[in-house]
Structures are given as C-alpha cells and as structure tokens.
Image: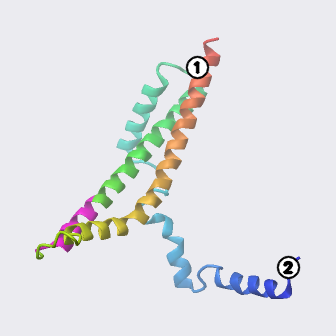
Amino acid sequence: MASERQIAANRRNACKSCGPRSSAGKERASRNAYRHGLSARVVPSADLAKRIEKLARKIAGDTADEVILENALTAAQAQFDLAGVRQVRMALMQRTAVFREFESGETATATATLPSPESECTAEAIRRVLPELLKLDRYARRALGRRQRSVRIIKDRILVINK
C-alpha cells in the first residue's frame, strides 16, 4: 500500500507530465508526426499508384485469388514506404555531411595526442543526427513488418491452393 507521502509525490509528478497546456503547445504537438511525412497515410499520386500496382502484380503473379492480390498490394505499398524512409535517411545524412564540412572549415593542424577538429566535428554531426535516425528506424521497422506479414500470408495461401 502506498503511503500518503508517496501518493502526494505521484500526484505532483502526474501534474508535470500531462502534455502541453497552451493552445500553441497543443497545436505544435499535434504536428509532431508530420515532420517528415512518413506517418501520414496519404493517397498516392496516379504515377505512384501505377507503380505500386505493377509491383503488386509482380508479387502476386498470375493469380486471381483476392487474398493474394490484397496482400501483394500491401507488400508493394510497404516496399515503397521503405524506399521513402531510405530517401529521408539519405537526405539527413547528406545534411550531416554538409554540416561537417561547414563546421570543420580551415583550422590549425592538431597535435597527435588530441583528436583532430575534423573528427570532433564528425562526432558532433553524428551526435546531432542520431536521434532523428532512431526515429526513422521506427517507420522502417513498421513498413518491414507489414511487408513480411503480407509475404508470409501470400506464401501460406499459395501452399493451401497448391495442395
């Protein structure tokens, strides 16, 4: 059983961690997931929809089974989502490289016992980009899971049909 002191401490902590209170803070927090657009489920453009459909047809083969076709479409969409994550990741890495070049500039040569200014700059660039890369990993894992699940269902369905 919690003591009165512990209950009071829990209440104080709960008041501190209930999210933004101002309308501006709530508005900003509501847009957190749209920073890079990976979490938004948007209708693909006509060109992208054609490309997804084409890949789904390659995955499904010449079958007319609705379950296989639906899961092939899910797997194809997940593949394009993975490509989007890769593009965002590459853009982030390119920004890091530009930052590193900008920060290193022309500096005096370092002694053998101290890290070079370039390596310090590289370390700082990596330190700054690492949290974003970890966030992107979540989207990649989610898309990869969808793709693997769909492929597994397709494989199981084909085995059932071929029996």
- The quarter in which the C terminus is drawn is top right
**Residue nearer the viewer, 139 or 57:** 139
- Picture coordinates of residue 125, whole percent (x, y): 30, 68
- Which residue is painted at 20% across and 73% down in the image? 103
Quarter holding the N terminus is bottom right
Q: Residue furthest front?
A: 113
Question: Magenta span has 149?
Answer: no
Side (left or right) of 35 relative to 145: left
Q: Position of residue 90 (x, y in %)?
A: 31, 54
- Please give the label number shown on residue 158: 1
Residue at the spot 57% in from the left edge and 27% down from the top edge? 154
- Label 2 amino acid? Ala
Instruction: Please tell me whether mark 1 sits on a helix, a strand or a loop.
Output: helix
Quadrant assignment, res 6: bottom right
Question: Is 4 situated above or below 47?
Answer: below
Instruction: Magenta stretch: give its range.
Output: 94-106
